[in-house]
């Protein structure tokens, strides 16, 4: 069977990751991986040069057929322009893939390029070689600084009429207009249930300022109240997704998913919000690929669109 080489890139507000992925039939594996700090000024040329250098580095001079980039925000329907980054700014309304293509050409590389919302890349990765292999209907939730989601319905990634579908972090969940969200609106799920929200609130109360430490001390009443409130809100968001989409499973990814027992905790909290006939089918599990799902997904986005 033919072996195919592609590069997957995950562009984050703090870190950029790139991996060389070898695909052979239904098997995929990461051969090399590098991580670098995202250029501070987020100047387009600096960012695409950094990604192009990393692509060259992981490729080790081998010919790359495809390269894909996961973007933490909204993309236009053509998937060539970033419309809005939700947790940092500086790269919007620029033909990002054209700039990246030029930067790669200067380094002697001309892979077929694609970009996709980062949570969508996680969903593609899980479908390709992770917890969603064999599933036609599932939702991946990336629980970290913000809350992202990637949705498959009937075996296809849902992107919507304008390319912006599957943004579960921006479900309206609170009537409070003062809860400003990174998307420019208010009262969304990620303003009340993201790690960023929990950590900022914990720091204000003199508790450990990172979610995993907080999770470990959840016997402490103050930590428990804080975590409970966020997970309860998240459970209502998950129940809303389930009643609309009736997925086979919900897959948790991102930093918060590493907290031991969080899938079971969210299952218990989601169950009471579901209609009775749907309760038997509730299934929430943690990703088997972790952060690599985003890289596998980015590397295979072009394959999905061939
Ligand atoms: Zn929002």
Image: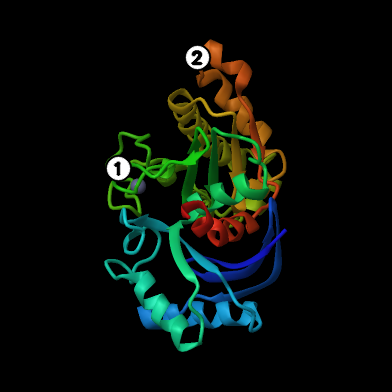
The quarter holding residue 296 reads bottom right
The yes-or-no answer for disc 2 within 8 Å of ligand 1 is no
Between discs 2 and 1, the one toward the N terminus: 1
Determine which of the numbered discs, if any, sits on residue 161 in the image: 1
Question: Where residue 67 sits: x, y (%)?
Answer: 52, 68
**Residue found farthest to the top:** 276
Name the residue: 69% across, 50% down.
Answer: 26
Question: Where residue 118 sits: x, y (%)?
Answer: 48, 56
The N terminus appears in which quarter of the rendering?
bottom right
Q: Seen in the image, is 239 located left or right of residue 248? A: left
Q: Seen in the image, is 166 located left or right of residue 250? A: left
The yes-or-no answer for disc 1 within 8 Å of ligand 1 is no
Callout 1: few (<14), some (14-19), or many (20+) C-alpha neighbours within 10 Å? few
Label 1: element kind:
loop
Name the residue: 51% across, 70% down.
Answer: 14
Question: Where residue 30 sits: x, y (%)?
Answer: 70, 64
Which residue was labeled with disc 2?
Answer: 275
Name the residue: 61% across, 53% down.
Answer: 255
Asked whether residue 43 is in view, the answer is: no
Question: Where residue 249 sits: x, y (%)?
Answer: 60, 32
């Amino acid at each position: 069977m033919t072996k195919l080489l592609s590069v997957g890139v995950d562009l984050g507000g703090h870190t950029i990751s790139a991996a060389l992925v070898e695909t052979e039939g239904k098997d995929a594996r990461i051969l090399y991986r590098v991580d670098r700090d995202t250029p501070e000024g987020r100047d387009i040329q600096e960012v695409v040069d950094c990604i192009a250098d990393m692509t060259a580095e992981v490729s080790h001079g081998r010919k790359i057929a495809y390269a894909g980039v996961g973007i933490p925000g909204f993309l236009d329907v053509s998937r060539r322009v970033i419309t809005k980054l939700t947790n940092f700014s500086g790269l919007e309304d620029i033909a990002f893939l054209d700039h990246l293509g030029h930067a790669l050409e200067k380094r002697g590389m001309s892979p077929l390029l694609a970009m996709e919302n980062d949570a969508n890349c996680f969903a593609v990765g899980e479908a390709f070689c992770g917890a969603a292999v064999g599933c036609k209907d599932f939702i991946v939730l990336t629980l970290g600084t913000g809350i992202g989601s990637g949705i498959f319905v009937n075996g296809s990634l849902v992107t919507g009429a304008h390319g912006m579908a599957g943004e579960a972090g921006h479900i309206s969940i609170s009537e409070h207009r003062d809860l400003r969200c990174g998307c420019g609106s208010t009262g969304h799920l990620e303003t009340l249930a993201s790690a960023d929200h929990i950590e900022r609130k914990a720091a204000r109360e003199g508790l450990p300022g990172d979610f995993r430490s907080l999770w470990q001390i959840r016997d402490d009443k103050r930590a428990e109240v804080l975590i409970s409130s966020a997970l309860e809100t998240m459970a209502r968001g998950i129940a809303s997704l389930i009643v609309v989409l009736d997925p086979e499973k919900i897959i948790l990814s991102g930093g918060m998913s590493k907290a031991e027992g969080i899938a079971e905790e969210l299952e218990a909290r989601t169950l009471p919000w579901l209609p009775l006939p749907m309760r038997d089918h509730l299934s929430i599990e943690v990703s088997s690929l972790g952060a690599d799902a985003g890289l596998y997904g980015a590397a295979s986005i072009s394959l999905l669109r061939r």
